[in-house]
Image: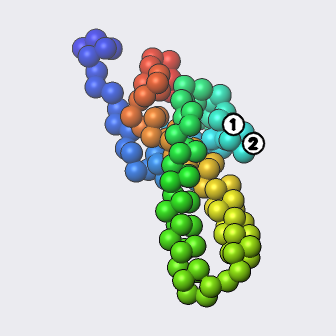
Amino acid sequence: MSRDAQPEEDRPLRPALLRGWRRRCPNCGSGPLLRGYLKVRESCPVCGEDLHHQRADDGPAYVTILLVGHVVGPALLWAFIRWRPDPLVLATIFSVIAITMSLWLLPRVKGAFVALQWSRRMHGFGAEGNR
């Protein structure tokens, strides 16, 4: 059987997404995925998996905004109806909450995006030469 005719090994989606969410290599789950806050490493320092193929672009930012907006928006409305605080106090508190959530979610969502691409062999992750 030729090398091209062999079926590609399975890359399960759920474990890869969980590893990406934890900001770990989607292949081994041990090596760090990110170098710094959002910069994806060229390759995993533990297993050597090439990670430079990723094309997360603006996707993680859009998903983060969507998640934060869906949590903070209804909570803001509920707090306003329930307690009727001063608008400046309400804006200050919910701005801090939104910024904190965004900063916490963004690298995790980016890790999940890279893991999704790795799992589905998108953008060169399934090419020959990868581990």
Badge 1 amino acid: Lys
- Could you give the CA–CA distance between mark 1 and mark 2, rounded to whole angstroms? 6 Å
From this viewpoint, is residue 84 visible?
yes
| Left or right of 114, for residue 5 | left
Q: Residue at x 57, y 33 (%)?
A: 57
Q: Where is 22 relative to 13, above or below?
A: below
Residue identifier under label 1: 39
* Residue 87 picture location, percent across and down: 69, 75
* Residue 43 picture location, percent across and down: 63, 30
Disc on res. 108: none
Q: Which image quarter: residue 75?
A: bottom right
* Residue 40 picture location, percent across and down: 65, 35
Badge 2 amino acid: Gly
Q: Residue at x 28, y 11 (%)?
A: 2
| Left or right of 6, for residue 99 | right
Q: Which image quarter: residue 39?
A: top right
Closer to the camera, 32 or 109?
A: 109
Quarter of the figure with the N terminus: top left
Q: Which image quarter: residue 50?
A: top right
* Residue 74 picture location, percent across and down: 50, 71
Q: Where is 103 relative to 49, above or below?
A: below
Residue identifier under label 2: 36
Asked whether disc 1 touches disc 2, contact meaning CB atoms under 8 Å apart, the reply is: yes
